[in-house]
Structures are given as structure tokens and as C-alpha cells.
Image (cartoon, helix red, strand yellow):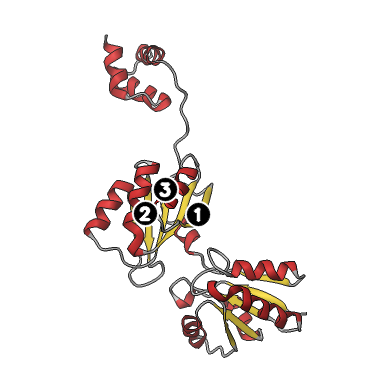
Amino acid sequence: MGKLFVVGTPIGNLEDISARGIKTLEEVDFIAAEDTRVSLKLLSRYGIKKPMVSYYEHNARERGEQILQRILAGENGAVITDAGMPCISDPGEDLVALCAENGVEVVVVPGPSAAISALAISGLATRRFAFEGFLDPKKNARKKQLEEIKEDRHTLIFYEAPHKLLATLEDMLAVLGNRKISLARELTKTFEEVVRTDLQGAIEHFTATTPKGEFVLIVEGAAEQRAEIPLEEAVKQVKLLQEEGLSAAEAAKTISRQTGIKKGDLYKASLQ
């Protein structure tokens, strides 16, 4: 019985493939690729000549069985995607599951990931995050998905195509509120760009500038739920801080952050 190697490929710059990735692709018996024409550019760059099998969303079931039978017969195969790690928002997920169900050893050869690369340079919190991938292209279904995760305090990661970007941003603003966002496109390529703003700013920017390239959206998680207390109690806390030496404005700002009550309301009430 052979093995299936899951090999990460560059997300843009062809020099980002690892030495182990090149060695693996040179040694396997065949390579399953999402788009053989795209993958051929990478293989040609490193002088790798191997039989290729087209494996993508619409032929995954039939072609997956064929790949499995070849591996069960003793061949070693590699699965790669057009860019990045296979199996992440990618039909390679089904092939790995099929091999696992049939006792085939699956070996990972790590490589670049657009999601993690964009998160690393987003400027937003990276300790806890949730990968959501592509949202549903239909507006109602997309809004429902956003409603389901709007209370999630993890940083959220999405993929989006340029022609759908504005509609997605508008739905995010409507459902999630005006959160911070980092939009990364063309990572590792000549025209790499990262826009760090908020959702309203992103809509304004990409209304004036036509979106180009595939995007990774890194969206700030939901704010921590604040304790709800009566205005009168919050005003007492403002006055206590004033007694400790803070100005009315500084005290109102501090208690506003802690309670969610508007700073102006606290300030006015504390002066009465």
C-alpha cells in the first residue's frame, strides 16, 4: 500500500515552496492537482515531471476513488491545490477523509496558507481565531451565516472574490456592526496590498477603488459583553472616580468603557 502526501504550495511567489515539498513531488508516482494547468507552472519551475491527475470539486467523488485504488495498489500520490495548503476550503478534504477511512497513511508536507499569512500581518488579535472561509454567495444565506457568528469573540477569517467583496462588506456592516478589518490581497505577489481600516472605511475605499485579486478578510471579533447596570448606579461610580482625582470627562469615559453606557449621558448626569 502506498501513501497520500498533502503538499502545501506557494500562494503566489513560486519560491515559497519548501525543499521538502519539492523533494516529495519529485519522488511520488503521481500528483493530483486542482487545475493541472496552474500546477504545471510550479512543476516546470523546478523541473518536476510527473503524471498528473485532475482532481477538483466537480469530479472529486469519481476521481477520488480512482486515486484511492492507485494508492491501495502500491503507488504514492501527492495532492496539491492551485495555491496554499490543500484541504482548506478545498476538495482535498474529501480525498484525505476517503484515504483515512480506508487505512491509507496520509502525510502532511506543510506550506504557505493565505489565511494564516493574512492573519499574521493584520494587526488584529491572533491568539484566538475562527476560519470561516467563503460565505454563501446568496444574500439571505450569507446574512444568516453572519448572524450565527456575530457574538463570536474570536478574530474571524474569510475568503472572498473581488466581484463579491462589496456586497459581503455591506452585509458584514449590517450584521456585525462597524468593526475593525484587515483586507489582504495578492499576498507574496508583486501587487501585494493590505488595507487596515473598519468595515465602513473598507466599503468607502472599495467603492472608490475597484477590487482586484482574491481577498482574505480578517475581521475583529465581537466585543466583550458588558454588565448592564442602571444609569444611576453608573453615575455613582463616575462620582467615586472624581473623588479620587479624575475629571468628570475622564471618569465618564472610564465608566462608559466598563458599562457600555454613552459617555455623554454619564457626563451630563454626573453634573446634575
Q: Quadrant of residue 166?
A: bottom left
Query: For the point 34% across and 58% down, which residue is it?
Result: 165
Q: Residue at x 57, y 77 (%)?
A: 55
Percent x, y of residue 167: 33, 55
Dot in front, 3 or 1:
3
Residue 18 seen from this side:
no
Instruction: Label 2: state its secondary structure.
Output: helix
Mark 3: which amino acid? Answer: Lys
Cα separation between marks 2 and 1: 13 Å
Whether residue 100 is situated above or below residue 166 in the rendered picture? below
Circle 3 residues within 10 Å: few <14, some 14–19, many ≥20 = some
Q: Kindly report which numbered mark, 2 or 1, lies closer to the viewer in this rendering.
A: 2
Q: Which mark is residue 143?
A: 3
Question: Which numbered disc covers residue 168?
Answer: 2
| Horizontal side of residue 209 vs 97, given as left or right | left
User: Mark 3 and mark 1: span between their CA atoms?
Assistant: 13 Å
Label whose residue precedes the other's in the sequence (3 or 2): 3
Residue 156 seen in render: yes
Identify the image quadrant of the C terminus.
Answer: top left
Q: Amino acid at mark 2?
A: Thr
Q: Which structural element holds mark 1?
A: strand
The residue pinned by badge 1 equals 132
